Amino acid sequence: MAKVKKVALAYSGGLDTSCIIPWLKENYDGCEVIAVCADIGQGDELNVVKEKALKSGASKVFIANLTEEFLTEYVWPTLKAGAVYEGKYLLGTSFARPLIAKKLVEIAKQEGCDSVAHGATGKGNDQVRFELSVKALAPQLHIIAPWREWELKSREEEIEYAKKHDIPIAIDNKTYSMDRNIWHLSHEGSDLEDPWNAPQDNMFLVTQVPEKAPDEDEHLAIEFEAGVPVAVNSKRLSATELLTTLNEIGARHGIGITDLCENRLVGMKSRGVYENPGGAILYYAHRELEYLCLDRATLHYKELVAQRYAELVYDGLWFTQLREALDAFVDSTQRTVTGTVRLRLYKGNIMSAGAKSKYSLYNKEYVTFEEDDVYNQADGTGFINLFGLPLQVRALMQEKTGLLK
């Protein structure tokens, strides 16, 4: 074991990180452990965190309210980029980790720690996200990943360890491995480990299943300024208020359930079911406004950027030059993505109900089926002749050489 005197631990209050506190003290010569808990809108889970950490052996506990920063500095840039991992995953866990790591490093420096620790397993993506962020922000800090070192191999062994060390834990009947913040709730494990099994209705804790949603649709309007959502139904809201409002509306109508067998960075596939009611609404609305405000070449190229951006976020490469450079491109495209989008929600479905923007590139005079004075349809002949010239030349060559036979 490396010589460690003081460790800042990314602490959630769950079984893993509660066991990590005494384990660190036992295995690193009685080192001091400071628990750092990030509040990113996970709800009532934080009510007992401080007392729990202290009883588990932490010398200090920091609970940082990061919800607004999480949305404005991590979620909104990803939303503006249109980044979705493998066409489905809205990156709810992925972009939370660099922010948690940033706060962990900040407190580690403030408290004079020589090390940081996290509770991510050796099988998942989070170990990469935490550690790459620490390396980018404070390369001098030693990183401890207990799941890659200790002898505990299962939840049952962790529970026994907790009992032996008088660690206060709630032995609940939670079936799934879950991660929650204001943006999403994820479910993994248990019966979901077989991709043939459909998600059970009683698994969902945020979103109403579509079958039980109201029989009446609901209309809403979302306003954006430079790609950032700022108002719902004409009411301007903070980022936290806005997403909370959309979460409530979307959950009521069964919006935002995603089931994905995704490719983890570490090489294996994993099955995850995600609840993203507000996020699904925002992505849909933002895309509708881009259809109105971005030209063809920019929109299509931005789709390529979105895929790469999603991979960077998923892979834990938030604090990189490439992500910053892509942000510059995205921000340039978003200068005109300002306007209002109307949507209809009904039993798990989001439907367009109109969009408007002062920067709209839609011009009715040019596309009308009625008579107009701005477009000469005869111009289409020359356009097609030039656009199709490579096809014509190739066909002549094929006829001449016999390649068509």
Image (cartoon, rainbow, N blue to C red):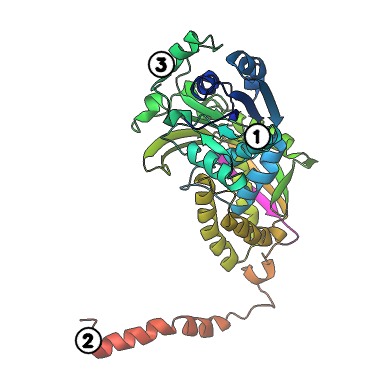
Q: Which residue is mark 3?
A: 157
Point 47% across, 39% down: residue? 125
SS state under label 3: helix
Q: Amino acid at mark 2?
A: Gly
SS state under label 2: loop
Q: Which mark is residue 158?
A: none
Q: Disc 3 or disc 1, which is closer to the eye? A: 1
Q: Disc 2 or disc 3, which is closer to the eye? A: 3
Q: Which region shows up in magenta?
A: 349-359
Residue 351 highlighted magenta (yes or no)? yes
- CA distance for labels 3 and 1: 30 Å
How packed is label 1: few (under 14 Cα within 10 Å), some, or many (20 or more)? many
Q: Disc 1 or disc 2, which is closer to the eye? A: 1
- CA distance for labels 2 and 3: 74 Å
Quarter of the picture containing the C terminus is: bottom left
How packed is label 2: few (under 14 Cα within 10 Å), some, or many (20 or more)? few
Q: Which residue is mark 1?
A: 108
Taking depth in this image into account, of 355 and 44 the one nearest to the observer is 44
Q: Which residue is mark 2?
A: 402
- CA distance for labels 1 and 2: 74 Å
Q: Amino acid at mark 1?
A: Ala
